[in-house]
Image: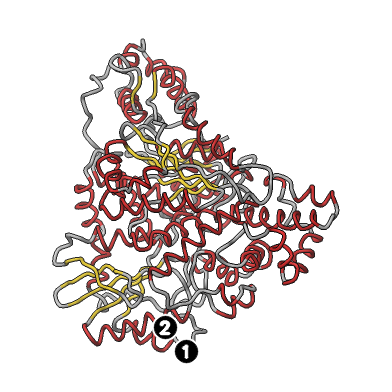
Amino acid sequence: MPNPSIDPFADDIVDDPWRVEYSVPGLNESVTNKVVADIDALCRPERPRIDTPLQKALLIPSPGAGFGKSHLIGTLFERLRGRATLVNIRPFEDPETCWKSILMRIVQELRFPDRYAVADGEASNVTQLEVFAHGVLSQVVADRLDAINGNKETIRRLRQPPEQLTWLPGNQNWRTYLDEHINNGGWIGQVQQLLGRRFLLEVALESWLKVLYGYAYVYQDDWNLQQACLDWMQGDPIDDDAAQEIGIRLPDRIRVDQTASAINGLAKSRVLDLCLLAGFFRPFLICFDQTETYGKSAELASTLGTVTTDLTNEARNQLTLITANILPWRKLLKVHWQQASLARLDGSLILEGINLQQGIELVDHRLCVFDVDETRRERFWGDRQWFESLFQGSKEMSVRMFLHECSRRWIEGGEEIAKPESRSPRTSLLTLFKRYVDDISAKPRRLVYDRDTFYWLVNELAVGVEGMTVDKVTSESREHLPCWRNGDRQFVFGFESGNHWKRWHNIARSALTENEQNGRIRVYLRTPELPKIPKATWRVAKPDIEQAMRSCLLILVLDQHELVRLYAAQELHADALQGDIDWKAKEVTDFLRQELADLWQSILHWPESGSNEPPNESPNESQEHAPSEELHHAIVKVVSESRFLSLEELIDRLPGELDRETVLGVCGEATRITVHAHPNMTVVQWRH
């Protein structure tokens, strides 16, 4: 039986489009159909699709907060799964490295499971990137076989839809064929000749095919080489030995001493290449949500316009979608866009509010999902006069406002409620933050390196910390890096997710030089899934790196608890900027500075704080300390038997002492468990 204290209407913010499981029939259906039709126009049968029609980016404005911008993206992800490669771009914070952020987000998103492979509640381990690799390689081979009048049945099987390509990795004949031909320069030359001059990648097709083949087939059990494939795709340098093993051509290897501008340009070229390669497979839907964040500065706003123009003009096989609230769009974004960028937008669509009939359907769905009994349903509905009164002044209203009114009715136990314009006391920031912490804890795949959250932390949130000023300094790569000045000490923040020894050797030597000249300390934040620096095998670089780490190079590896709190803080701040919560952005900023005080102090008091951790030889330490399979089974057993229970009840029924973050992380990985992080409690639910 469900807990009667659980409010079915409290969950009113969509913060993960992949978790959208229900859409009200008819609500914003015309908008959804337009996007789907534009994707269908890109899905022409020929391979590769080089001459796809250039389409305008779609601007989907909302009359205000709470009309379902993120929910729309979730609905599109559900409608288009298996038909498009779906990417949701969190806002970039640094205009200088915008393409680096976008590329990293695309590759990270591609590492999520491919949603068409979910069946009977159990997720396939096949990722979007693996399916992308299968799709590209199968079509390249099919084209080549077709050109030489190869076996028709083999060609037919290779041209099957994506969901029917799961046989490829286990087929020995296919593996043998790839092993023989991918490393055959003559064969690849024939493939490129067949494609012609119109199919022009920024790097050689040979390097791309070998990286995709290595990632999806050869290095499944070799973490280091598979990670090297990912690093190369993300525009990060990799060791020459790894590049040679994979088969990346010498001209396509990435130098470690590039300028920030060159790195950003290289990242853009990777994005364009991925889109062109999608011509063998299925198009990309690239979504920019939370766009109010770009209104923080004119430079950020104009950069979003430039990125949109570049994607629309240069990237094939993709559709760009931008959501925005109308008022911030007009006042904070549009005024900073060039006319050429505005001309690349199709702004003919606008989100609708929910009407009375759709409201009835949404309420019935929520009551059904939460197994509300008939007695409580009747008490909630009453004579329905309260419900009809919600739509007396207007035929429609924002979904969030509608859910707020339903929530008030629920809390009152079915008693008559005050007029809609009267407001309930807002939830405290501390309670809200705890909710966001629980929500992020249930998204373990979110807990990876995010340069933009780190940039926001040290460049924006840090402004106003007592005794500290924040400005910029120019690095050796001519990048403008955030700098904290605290008394006579300076802390300069770099952003590096890569693991190339030469890159870190250069960083260490620059840190030693800067410290000697002006007392600066370099700080790099890292996440648990990344290898710790330095590696034991770095015989040349290791002494200099360790010397710098003792005095002027702080490599701060955030543990999972710190990472959860940091990412929860960033999400809370973003929702305040969008008007999704009843707190102003400045109020949230002031609160978060206090909540993250320990992080400021661990940096400002270094090296006394002892924050530098010794190197760990394991390249994937986070996997070694992942929750056990026994815990996963125990959680699934308890939740499946109870259907609904609070997080506290779940923890009480599990063996041993477990913290909230660990339990929520397991729940987030289980496809049949849904986590509802409500302001008053966090609830876990078993889905049929």
Residue 453 screen position, x and y as percent? 35, 58
Viewer-nearest residue: 94 or 197: 197
Helix, strand or loop status at disc 2: helix
Who's the residue at 26% across and 59% down the image?
596
Evaluate if marks 2 and 1 touch, with contact meaning CB atoms under 8 Å apart. Answer: yes
Answer with mark 2 or mark 1, whichever residue precedes in sequence.
2
Q: Is residue 447 above or below residue 51?
A: below
Q: Is 11 drawn above or below residue 238 in the view shown?
A: above
Q: CA distance from mark 2 to mark 1?
A: 8 Å
Instruction: Name the kind of residue labelled 2 in the image.
Output: His
Residue at image position (64%, 57%) is 133
Task: Classify mark 1: residues with Cα within 10 Å, few (<14), some (14-19) or many (20+).
Answer: few
Picture coordinates of residue 626, whole percent (x, y): 51, 61
Tell me, yes or no, if residue 628 can be seen here: yes
Characterize the local packing of mark 2: few (<14), some (14-19) or many (20 or more) Cα atoms within 10 angstroms.
many
Q: Residue at x 21, y 43 (%)?
A: 584
- Quadrant in the picture for residue 350: top left
Q: Quadrant of the C terminus?
A: top right
The answer to whether 491 appears left or right of 133 in the picture is: left
**Picture coordinates of residue 578, whole percent (x, y):** 30, 42
Tell me which residue sits at (14%, 74%) in the image.
487
Q: Quadrant of residue 300?
A: bottom left
Q: Where is residue 70 drawn, in percent x and y?
A: 41, 39
Residue behind mark 1: 540
Q: Which mark is residue 505?
A: 2
Residue 344 figure quarter: top left
On screen, residue 491 above or below 51 = below
Residue type at mark 1: give it: Val
448 versus 568 height, above or below: below
